[in-house]
Image (cartoon, rainbow, N blue to C red):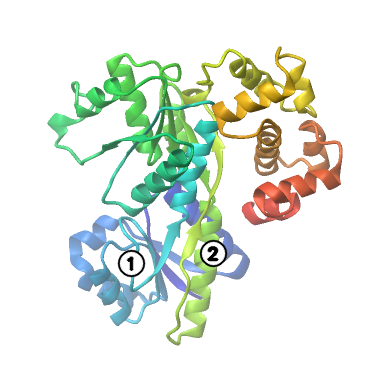
């Protein structure tokens, strides 16, 4: 019966999601025995004492936050398989639970571009891999469309300098930004800091600034005022895959090169903090509103043309200039995003969801879905829903 030490933070959605996935694997392939150890214990007693305790307990593996390569080396010397959550940087001497961080930044940028934004900002940490690479993916996508990104780096300040006590450099930066502004925060914690700082400085969300976080932490997103939009991550599958890999590492015992576990972004969950369109074009703004309000129907470009007094060519040219996407592609991508969200959020059959989202041909749906998501609807649901 494998005995696994878990070093992860249950206060945040990411850590809870990892453990859900690990438990799902253990339920299928166990039984396993777990010890969830607070990081504070390891930090307070030092890595040598932690390794001694782990060996005395009979630990077969460790999954969680290991901050340095020196700590990882000590665990390897103790002969205990390790999968490290990349809390600050990926470790070169351990298997990492890491993420497709560039893809997450790209998803955020495309989300804002589709809503007509031309001003972009990023709020995060330069010295942490998941923040830095999300910023890189965000900026690369924004630059590809001819725009630039305004940056603000968060530092772990003294309490007397925190943003909620008095006007701060963060508040001053937010005030200085051109409006309307599309802002990506590196995670939901910093996203909520943005909504609070905007409240302090009188910046209206989402009218003047649209804020988007990462992790889709329900507690943080709903306590935010207004509620924070966020990118959800496939972290439960990441936990499941980490447990499956740990199982192999324990059973095979011999030294082998293992691949990192990559947690991918799934979708953008829209709440009040981004629930607006930034297009100033008098034709594209109503076009966007019409598309989003009627996306559940079998919507086509011809339907949009009936409500916008422009020729098809003129509308399509202006639409691509504002959003960066061809009109027909924007519509079917939006429909696929709604369809994929319902696949994961409901128990309805694929046929029922297809009917609800206006798809009248299962063959056409499967083709379009695979074009956007890289797999069929059934494969997508099976891949992302771990019981």
Residue 387: in sight, yes or no? no
Is disc 2 placed on a helix, strand or loop?
Answer: helix
Residue at 21 percent of width and 41 percent of height: 155
Q: Which residue is mark 1?
A: 91
Question: Relative to residue 232, is residue 148 drawn left or right?
Answer: left
| Residue 30, placed above or below residue 252 | above
Q: Position of residue 329 (x, y in %)?
A: 68, 37
Between 19 and 257, the one nearer to me in the picture: 257
Residue at 65 percent of width and 24 percent of height: 292
Q: Position of residue 151 (x, y in %)?
A: 30, 36
Question: Relative to residue 167, is residue 85 drawn left or right?
Answer: right
| Residue 216, placed above or below residue 44 | above
Q: Which residue is mark 2?
A: 241
Residue at 70 percent of width and 49 percent of height: 371
Between 111 and 252, the one nearer to me in the picture: 111
Q: CA distance from mark 2 to mark 1?
A: 18 Å
Residue neighbourhood size for the residue with mark 1, other residues' Cα within 10 Å, grouped as few (<14), some (14–19), many (≥20): many
Residue neighbourhood size for the residue with mark 2, other residues' Cα within 10 Å, grouped as few (<14), some (14–19), many (≥20): many
């Amino acid at each position: 019966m494998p005995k696994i030490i878990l070093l992860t933070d249950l206060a945040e959605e990411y850590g809870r999601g990892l453990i859900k996935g690990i438990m799902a694997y253990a339920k299928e392939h166990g039984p396993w025995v777990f010890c969830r150890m607070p990081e504070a214990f390891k930090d307070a007693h030092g890595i040598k004492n932690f390794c001694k305790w782990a060996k005395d307990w009979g630990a077969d593996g460790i999954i969680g936050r290991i901050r340095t390569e020196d700590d990882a080396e000590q665990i390897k010397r103790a002969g205990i398989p390790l999968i490290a959550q990349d809390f600050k940087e990926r470790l070169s001497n351990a298997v990492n639970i890491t993420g497709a961080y560039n893809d997450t930044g790209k998803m955020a940028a495309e989300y804002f571009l589709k809503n007509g934004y031309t001003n972009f900002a990023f709020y995060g940490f330069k010295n942490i891999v998941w923040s830095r690479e999300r910023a890189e993916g965000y900026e690369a996508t924004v630059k590809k469309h001819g725009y630039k990104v305004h940056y603000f780096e968060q530092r772990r300040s003294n309490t007397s300098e925190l943003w909620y006590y008095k006007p701060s450099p963060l508040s001053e930066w937010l005030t200085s930004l051109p409006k309307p502004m599309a802002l990506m925060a590196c995670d939901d914690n910093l996203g909520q800091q943005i909504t609070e700082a905007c409240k302090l400085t009188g910046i209206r969300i989402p009218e003047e600034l649209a804020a988007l976080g990462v992790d889709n932490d329900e507690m943080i997103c709903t306590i935010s005022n207004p509620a924070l939009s966020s990118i959800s991550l496939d972290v439960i599958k990441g936990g499941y895959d980490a447990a499956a890999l740990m199982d192999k590492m324990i059973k095979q015992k011999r030294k082998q090169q293992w691949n990192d576990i990559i947690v991918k972004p799934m979708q953008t969950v829209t709440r009040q903090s981004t629930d607006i369109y930034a297009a100033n074009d008098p034709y594209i703004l109503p076009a966007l509103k019409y598309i989003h309000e009627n996306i559940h129907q079998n919507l086509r470009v011809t339907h949009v043309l009936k409500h916008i007094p422009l020729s098809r060519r003129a509308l399509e040219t202006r639409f691509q200039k504002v959003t960066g996407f061809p009109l027909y592609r924007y519509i079917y991508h939006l429909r696929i995003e709604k369809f994929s969200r319902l696949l994961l959020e409901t128990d309805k059959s694929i046929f029922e969801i297809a009917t609800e989202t206006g798809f009248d041909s299962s063959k056409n749906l499967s083709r379009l879905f695979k074009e956007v998501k890289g797999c069929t609807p059934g494969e997508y649901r099976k891949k992302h829903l771990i019981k």
